[in-house]
Image (cartoon, rainbow, N blue to C red):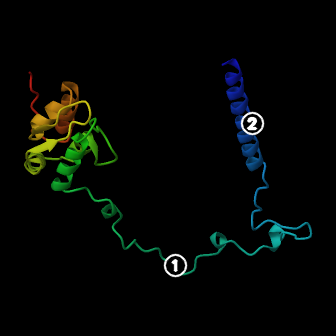
Amino acid sequence: MENQKKLILAVAGVTTLGLLFVLFKKSSAQTPQIPNRPQTPNQVMPEPDNMPPDIADMPVVGFEPTEPKVDLKGLVQAPNMANLSNLLFDAFNGAGTTWKDGQFGGVYGVFSQLKSDNDFDSLNEYYGIRRVNGGIFRKDYTGDMNSTMNYELSKREIRLINELLEKNGVTRRIIINEN
């Protein structure tokens, strides 16, 4: 039994040394030359005075900048209420609840997009009644937006959402279930 332990340790040691040797060889391999540097000793880089002018140093003659033809704010458009309801469902569905995921995703991201009572009502209507997969540790749950939020979020998290709604000028609130 003792000889087997020694053999296993010897094999593990040799394997580790072999891996370290391979890593050392790869890291000490010659790095490729940068193309604009001389490749041989007899090549000479031009002196700074003999180099062609940089485009940034050239005078601007008759050039007027124009406004971009693309509305840059339009490149990332806020999702509509149907998209937001799906993002909210995705935040609840499966193991765990996503609080914030990028600009629009997660519970906080969805509610940060609401700017009026109409937005809140539309989100609630689009969300409808859905069945949320509880993941490994929780049972599946079927309910509307308010009841699902009470099932998925703590009272503190719901209060944070309600504070966000108030800050955004929305008077509607998620009702906290006291049971």
Q: Above or below — where is 132 with respect to 60?
A: above
The kind of secondary structure element at disc 2 is helix
Does residue 72 show up? yes
Query: Picture coordinates of residue 136 (x, y %)?
Result: 26, 34
Query: Picture coordinates of residue 63 (x, y %)?
Result: 52, 78
User: Which residue lies under the disc numbered 1?
Assistant: 63
Residues under numbered marks 2 and 1 in contact, where contact means CB atoms less than 8 Å apart = no
Query: Picture coordinates of residue 34 (x, y %)?
Result: 75, 63
Camera-nearest residue between 36 and 15: 15
User: Which residue lies under the disc numbered 2?
Assistant: 17
Q: Dot 2 surroundings within 10 Å: few (below 14), some, or many (20 or more)? A: few
Camera-nearest residue between 137 and 121: 137
- Toward the top, the furthest residue is 2
Does residue 171 show up? no
Amino acid found under the numbered disc labelled 2? Leu
Residue at x 9%, y 50% (from the top left corner):
122
Query: Picture coordinates of residue 129 (x, y %)?
Result: 8, 45
The nearer-to-camera label among 2 and 1 is 2
Camera-nearest residue between 67 and 11: 11
Camera-nearest residue between 29 and 105: 29
Amino acid found under the numbered disc labelled 1? Phe
Q: Is residue 6 left or right of residue 73?
A: right
Q: Dot 1 surroundings within 10 Å: few (below 14), some, or many (20 or more)? A: few
Q: Alpha carbon of mark 2 to alpha carbon of mark 1: how far?
A: 64 Å
Residue at x 19%, y 33% (from the top left corner):
152
Q: Is residue 135 left or right of residue 48?
A: left
